[in-house]
Image (cartoon, rainbow, N blue to C red):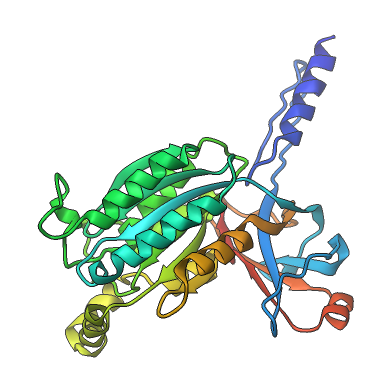
Amino acid sequence: MKQFRWLCAIGVLLCIPALSRRSLLRAQSQTTIEISTEIVVVDALVEQKKTGLPVEALKRDDLEIYEDGVRQTISQFSRDEVPLSIVFLFDMTDSVRPIIQQLTDGALASLNHLKAEDEVAVMLYAERADLAQSFTKDHAVVSQAIVNAGAMNPGHCGPTPDLCSQRAFFNEGIFQAAALAKKSGNPSNRRVIIWFTDNVPNNPDDSVHSEVAAFNLLRETGVVVCAVVGRSPSSYAALAIFNKNPIFALGRKKHPPGNANKYTEETGGVSAGVGRDDVNRNLTDLIDRVRSRYTIGYSPSIRKPEGAICRIEVKLSRDAIRREGAVEIRARTSYKR
């Protein structure tokens, strides 16, 4: 009877979906049996290169996944529209303020496109990051937090003067948003940061989290970063100074300030522009592209030490390339053991 209970426990552990799992069985006899199971789960968006339309009918054999250049055996494969846990992350620095109302209006409109089971949190950042609204499925509450963010200006910062700052510490904002996403109410949801920014960072210092720390946390959690990028005249002026001043160049080398495009590419996210485009339409499209993806799971063929950074590449098989033509695959490029 005891052996039966042990076997049932092992079966339950092996069936629990997670980014990385291990189970250890110790027999009650003198012999010790260790069973180690690790499943790496990768979400992949596959789109036609010419049209940008999703490729929706792929099968398990149509996709190949590699870890550190070694092809892996796909043990799990599906294409499901899963619930989302979204962190709306707003850049609140001076250069973004001329367009903050446009960004928050787009975020408000996008709430109508979410499903009842989707949960949302709101975070604001400049020199530091502040939680404006914790995760909730009450989208009316989220709406109020977004309205409050849009109303903030240098003269009305309330108890958060650091959010009325000229300085934007991107890595700190992403780190804190990823830490918040890690605490989402449903761990089986797809966790996403939707980042509203002008992509004009400031050189950070040792007082905030580094780009390395932010990427390591994203690798551990599997959070997807998506960016909504818009620029004001102040953004372009700040960008010109930032790019041309050699003093800033030295600081960037010592402390990489972070870049929205890099964060989206490394995590398999997508970007949307503002400019003259309809922010609401772009955000709706972005949410659809995050929600409906292929989920691929595999057990690494080579065991790596704890803390190792493992590189991932998802490809189309030769037969699928002949059938589908040129495609673009968006998936995270690494994970941390």
Question: Picture coordinates of residue 246 (x, y %)?
Answer: 20, 88
Question: Picture coordinates of residue 99 (x, y %)?
Answer: 29, 70
Judge left or right: residue 197 versus residue 23: left
Q: Is residue 181 above or below residue 225?
A: above
Residue 69 in which image quadrant: bottom right
Judge left or right: residue 38 versus residue 7: left
Considering the image in quadrants, where does the N terminus appear?
top right
Judge left or right: residue 131 versus residue 88: left
As drawn, the residue found furthest toward the top would be 1
Q: How many marks?
A: 0
Question: Picture coordinates of residue 281 (x, y %)?
Answer: 53, 68
Residues 317 and 306: in front is: 317
Identify the residue shown where x is 66% and y is 48%: 82
Identify the residue shown where x is 56% and y is 53%: 113
Residue 125 in which image quadrant: bottom left
Judge left or right: residue 133 versus residue 55: left
Question: Picture coordinates of residue 127 (x, y %)?
Answer: 21, 59
Residues 302 and 289: in front is: 289
Q: Is residue 81 above or below residue 254?
A: above
Identify the residue shown where x is 28% and y is 57%: 150
Residues 304 and 331: in front is: 331
Residues 266 and 20: in front is: 266
As drawn, the residue found furthest toward the left would be 155
Residue 216 visible at all: no
Residue 294 visible at all: yes
Residue 206 in which image quadrant: bottom left
Identify the residue shown where x is 84% and y is 16%: 4
